Amino acid sequence: MTTITISPHRPLGKLDRRIYGGFIEHLGRCIYGGIYDEGSGLSDERGFREDVLKLLKELRIAVLRWPGGNFVSNYHWQDGIGPKELRPARLDLAWGGVESNRFGTDEFIDYCRELGAEPYICLNMGSGSLEEALSWVEYCNSGRGTYWADLRRKNGHVEPYGVPWWGLGNELYGPWQVGALSAEEYVAKATRWARAIRMVDPEAKLVSCGELGWTDWDRKVIDGLAGLVDFHSVHLYTGSEDYWDDVLAPHAAERAISTATALLRRAAYTQGLARAPRLVYDEWNVWFRQMTDGLEERYVFQDALAVGVYLNIFVRNCAWVSMANMAQMVNAIAPIVTSPATAVAQPIYYPFLLHANGHLSTAVDAFVDGPTVEAPQERLSRWEHRVGDLGPFSLVDAAATMDKNRSQLAVTLVNRSENEERTELILQRGSFEGPAKVTSVTGTGRASRIEAVEEARSSEGEVMPTGSRLKMDLPPRSFTFMATGTKG
Ligand code: AHR
Ligand code: AHR
């Protein structure tokens, strides 16, 4: 039996819907054959796959990061504008492919508009020059009568795009990155870039390139750039064949958030900044099976539980996590998989769907008291992150939000137990109003539609509360969303 005490009067922070963000990279079939499929009968006149768009729209993606990832560190954006037949094909040094450049900045912005998502462009700080970066910002955001802004107009886009988010490079700490740097080199270079970008667009929101959140790279970059950027980014991938390792490893994000937050607070205090930069989790997901061949990971339902835990962690830490971008959206380590004939949702689609459509404006404290589990101490997956020292973890992981009048409550629950778990929600102040709507998703163990995509089963029901108490049974290994009214 698990008891979850929800405290409407203990807000944890305002939830920024940008935690329901996505990421698309020129990698395998993410763009070409994924979101963009020229000549397919399933695509619209712009080449956007309509079946993919429909599935993505349901996820209510708030912000979309592009064009990489590792790809961006040798991407030259000017190759991807103007008449398509004149665009050059280039070597993609990150993933070994050939980039046709038929999907570029204008297509990306059009796609974001169609989705209702804000664009977030990551700059090439590998092989790219500062001059190229400045011209990219000018092309997108300038309303003045200058060369690059005029070129955008000539390409059919009179109004500036107003791209709010700009990333100062991707994973530049890693030897797999074209143009990798030491932390000191990165800080010096990013300082010059940040100042110059703000001269083109003073409103640009800049994101420094962090690592995992707890590394020396993070410490040096935060100390060096806290006064110049709005956000510090971190990445995390987890995943394992071992069930417990798979569903507990996302708690490594809690180490990242608490460590990076301490570093950010410290930098803000010692440097006398009015406000510390916030965190952006601009790549996160379960990923461990398919490291090559377009990263076409086929997910099973235990991965969906891990994704539910990641999202719960972002909600609980929304005072500091301002954006998160699931890596990635289509085909490459993605909730959506396409074939020439169809697009289907993988199990990890469902926790994202229920989270993004259900959570409300303010996160509130949800204290979980119930059976716990220890994480494996040894490293079981390809990733180095261990979470053994962070446990024990409750079998049920929960996050709660309310609207600003405290008259509605939304709760997401991940039951990691192999048994059904009797769970009681207790409202610390006030009472539940009317029946609660409950949606639970579980795996079926069956893989039919597109090869090896496990199917998920969703069941919807209602539960009647009694005053401030609400009992429900969480199915074994399930993700559950609950919404109800509250009063008092
Ligand atoms: O998302 C796949 C890759 O993972 C990205 O290109 C890179 O940034 C990270 O290493
Ligand atoms: O690309 C490999 C890894 O992915 C990087 O080390 C890390 O930043 C991310 O988790």
Image (cartoon, rainbow, N blue to C red):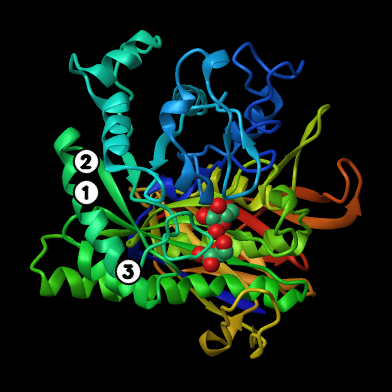
Mark 3 is on which residue type?
Ala
Q: Pointer 2 and pointer 1: residues touching (CB < 8 Å)? A: yes
Nearer the observer, disc 3 or disc 1?
3
Q: Is residue 94 left or right of residue 289?
A: left
Mark 2 to mark 1 CA distance (whole Å): 5 Å
- At horizontal 69% and vertical 71% (from top left) the residue drawn is 246
Query: 316 and 362: which one is in front?
Result: 316
Q: Secondary structure at mark 3?
A: helix
Q: Quadrant of residue 214?
A: bottom left
Mark 1 is on which residue type?
Ala
Tag 1 or tag 3, which sits nearer the N-term? 3
Query: 77 and 474: which one is in front?
Result: 77
Q: Which residue, given by chain and number where applicable, does mark 1 sit on?
A: 194
Q: Residues within 10 Å of mark 2 (few under 14, many from 20)?
A: many
- At horizontal 42% and vertical 46% (from top left) the residue drawn is 18
Q: Residues within 10 Å of mark 3 (few under 14, many from 20)?
A: many
Residue 396 shows in this picture: yes
* Circle on res. 197: 2
Residue 17: give x, y in percent of width and height: 42, 46
Q: Secondary structure at mark 2?
A: helix
* Circle on res. 259: none
Mark 2 is on which residue type?
Ile
Q: Is residue 46 left or right of residue 421?
A: left
Query: 6 and 209: which one is in front?
Result: 209
Q: Which residue, given by chain and number where applicable, does mark 3 sit on?
A: 183
Q: Quadrant of the N terminus?
A: bottom right
In the displayed structure, 110 sits above or below 453; it is above
Residue 485 shows in this picture: no
In the displayed structure, 121 sits above or below 245; it is above
